[in-house]
Image: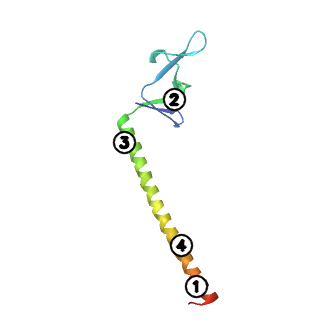
């Protein structure tokens, strides 16, 4: 698997294989061998070889890292939902107490 980066470090994405391209006699981009290439095609866009970095990476490790980040995000979301539920319960309790005090002030207790 390859990680494709721009020279400035911006990540374009990942690809299982690199699609090398060159310019044909008619001026169109066509697939080529690596040693004939002037660039690569990624997600339908041409990129000159001197504008990108092709970094070979362990695909399994990348998937593990993505899964770990997803699981961490899920845990953070779950914790946020618990905190939100606790805050809503506290607000509801405070509202009920305030209404009870108001009712007592207005009409007294029966």
- Label 2: few (<14), some or many (≥20) within 10 Å? some
Q: Which residue is mark 1?
A: 101
Q: Nearer the viewer, mark 3 or mark 1?
A: 1
Q: Which residue is mark 2?
A: 52
Residue 110: x and y, percent? 56, 90
What color scheme is it? rainbow
The answer for how far apart the CA atoms under marks 3 and 4 are is: 42 Å
Tell me whether circle 3 and circle 2 mark residues in contact (CB < 8 Å).
Answer: no
Q: Which residue is mark 3?
A: 64
Q: Establish if 32 lies above or below 97.
A: above
The tag earlier along the polypeptide, 1 or 4, is 4
Q: Establish if 32 lies above or below 16.
A: above
SS at badge 4: helix
Identified at 37% across, 34% down, the residue is: 59
The answer for how far apart the CA atoms under marks 3 and 1 are is: 56 Å
Tell me whether circle 2 and circle 1 mark residues in contact (CB < 8 Å).
Answer: no
């Amino acid at each position: 698997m390859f990680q494709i980066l721009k020279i400035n470090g911006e990540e374009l994405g990942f690809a299982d294989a690199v699609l090398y391209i060159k310019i044909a006699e008619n001026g169109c981009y066509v697939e080529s061998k690596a040693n004939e290439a002037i660039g690569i095609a990624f997600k339908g866009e041409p990129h000159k070889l001197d504008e990108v970095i092709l970094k070979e990476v362990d695909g399994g490790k990348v998937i593990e890292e993505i899964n770990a980040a997803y699981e961490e995000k899920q845990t953070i979301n779950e914790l946020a939902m618990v905190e939100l539920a606790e805050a809503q319960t506290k607000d509801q309790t405070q509202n009920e107490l305030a209404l009870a005090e108001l009712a007592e002030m207005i009409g007294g207790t029966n």
